[in-house]
Image: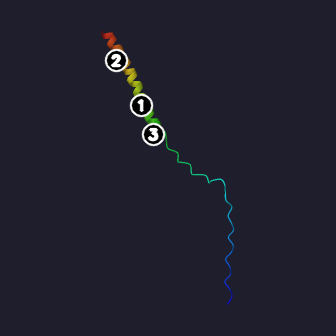
Amino acid sequence: MEPPPSPPVPVPTPVSLVSPPEKEPEAVVAQPVAVEQRRWALTALLLVIGSAGAGRAAMRRS
């Protein structure tokens, strides 16, 4: 009987010193936040204008 063939010698794989690029986090849609900020800004503006108008009306009546 013949001896079994020896297994092939493993070839070392080149080691990279640079880590593989990580997946970038998915972009979060910022539009709902912008819409909400715009609503709050309009609400604050209307409150300021309304309170100024109420103050003027009170000054005229007194």
Per the image, the residue denoted by label 1 is 40
Say if 14 sits above or below 36 in the image: below
- The quarter of the image holding the N terminus is bottom right
Say if 32 sits above or below 24 in the image: above
Residue 40 in the image, given as x and y percentages of width and height? 41, 31
| Mark closer to the chain start, 1 or 3 | 3
Q: Quadrant of residue 42?
A: top left
Per the image, the residue denoted by label 2 is 54
Per the image, the residue denoted by label 3 is 32
Check disc 2 and report its element: helix, strand or loop. Answer: helix
Bin the neighbour count of mark 3 within 10 Å (Cα to Cα): few under 14, some 14-19, many 20 and up: few
The number of numbered badges drawn on the structure is 3
| Mark closer to the chain start, 1 or 2 | 1
Q: Nearer the viewer, residue 10 or 43?
A: 10
Residue drawn at (37%, 21%), measured in percent from left and top? 50
Callout 1 amino acid: Trp
Real-space CA distance between mark 1 and mark 2, rounded to the nearest whole angstrom: 21 Å
- The quarter of the image holding the C terminus is top left
Bin the neighbour count of mark 2 within 10 Å (Cα to Cα): few under 14, some 14-19, many 20 and up: few
Residue 43 in the image, given as x and y percentages of width and height? 40, 28
Say if 31 sits above or below 21 in the image: above
Residue 35 in the image, given as x and y percentages of width and height? 45, 36
Residue 33 in the image, given as x and y percentages of width and height? 46, 38
Real-space CA distance between mark 2 and mark 3, rounded to the nearest whole angstrom: 33 Å
Bin the neighbour count of mark 1 within 10 Å (Cα to Cα): few under 14, some 14-19, many 20 and up: few
Callout 3 amino acid: Pro
